[in-house]
Amino acid sequence: MTVRVGIIGVGVMGADHARIVARETAGAKLQALADADGQRVKALASELGAETAITDPLAIINDPNVDAVIIASPDQTHQALTLACIAARKPVLCEKPLAPTQAECLAVVAAETALSRRLVQVGYMRRFDPGYADMKAACQSGDMGKALMLHCIHRNVSAPDWFTAGMAITNSAVHEIDIARWLLDAELTSVTVMKPPASPSAPVFLIFETSAGQIVDVEMFNNAVYGYDVRGELVCEKGTVSLRSPVTIETNSVLAQRLGHPADWRPRFAAAYRIQMRTWINAIQTGTDFVGASAWDGYAAGAVADAGLEALAKTHRSSVKLVDKPALYP
Ligand code: ISE
């Protein structure tokens, strides 16, 4: 069976998903697109051969020619659209976050639970990244002993103008929240957030404890200027496991060696997005459970992000008090 896919929102991620569905995913057909921008949606539909291009997202969900829906519209629209997919009994791949607050995420969990059927997958695509998958396998092999800490760095070139301070957590660091839960197979139970006051575009630093007593730290820097850069290092009892960024070339010229950085997440996680799509379509075709993040995972990430916002508002610190410096030490 060919899965006819409808996509809501054709900005950066929606357009990327549309190209992956139309050109690179066996068993899937790009059927319909919706976007608030009528011209943009028509242009993409004609580029990719989608039959329908409209502005009403609910019309896509209720279109009898659409078997499955991808939601890639702004974060604040995710909950209502996901609920509409559940009401229409259609499988839905909702971009992360499932919703900006845990209360909204919980309503999605409640709707699925009432139906006793899983229809929702959340687009935490890092779970499909070959690097993170190898990290998890190394962790599970037992060769490294227990995982004790996870260090994460997540940097973007610059935050878009509509990005709020809290979105550093609810839109960006949620990736680390999800991948830490998945890698360590534990819940994040507490969060401390700090922010250097030096500049409004400064990074946010988050420290989490897990239900197994591990520590996770995340430098979330949305305005790092130099490139898109995601790093991770697991510290285990008998060694460490670090992510390597998938670079294809190294340039040597004029007394310098360069590796280069992608401008955003699409090249860095190109494989992850494609594996995620293939796996999702395959699960729909075979009627098997989705292997990606569930609505529950979306809710758990939302609950941790909510706690992160609270911690951001009231940073906890113990002050260090030094005596006055004696003249002996200039
Ligand atoms: C963006 O929405 C993404 O999902 C990217 O993967 C992430 O790196 C970025 O920080 C988010 O804002």
Image: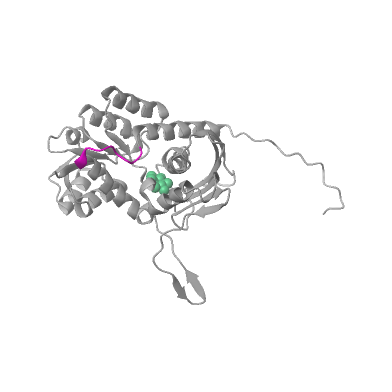
x and y, in percent, of residue 316 in the image:
62, 33
Q: Main secondary structure of the magenta part?
A: loop
Residue at image position (82%, 47%) is: 325
Whether residue 51 appears in magenta in the rendering, the answer is no
Q: Is residue 218 left or right of residue 276?
A: right
Which quarter of the rendered picture does the C terminus lie within?
A: bottom right
Residue at image position (58%, 48%) is: 237
Residue 160 visible in rendering: no
Q: Which residues are magenta?
A: 285-293
Judging depth in this view, the residue of 51 and 197 nearest the camera is 51
x and y, in percent, of residue 322 in the image:
78, 41
Q: Is residue 63 left or right of residue 226?
A: left
Q: Is residue 327 left or right of residue 145?
A: right
Residue that protrudes farthest toward the top in the picture = 114
x and y, in percent, of residue 230 in the image:
46, 52
Instruction: Please say if 244 is above or below 323.
Output: below
Q: What's the image's color scheme?
A: one colour
Which quarter of the rendered picture does the N terminus lie within?
A: top left
Residue 298 visible in rendering: yes
How many marks on residues?
A: 0
Residue at image position (40%, 59%) is: 262
Choose top left, top right, bottom left or bottom right for residue 107: top left
Residue at image position (57%, 51%) is: 238
Judging depth in this view, the residue of 259 and 326 nearest the camera is 259
Whether residue 288 appears in magenta in the rendering, the answer is yes
Q: Is residue 254 left or right of residue 272?
A: right
x and y, in percent, of residue 242 in the image:
50, 54
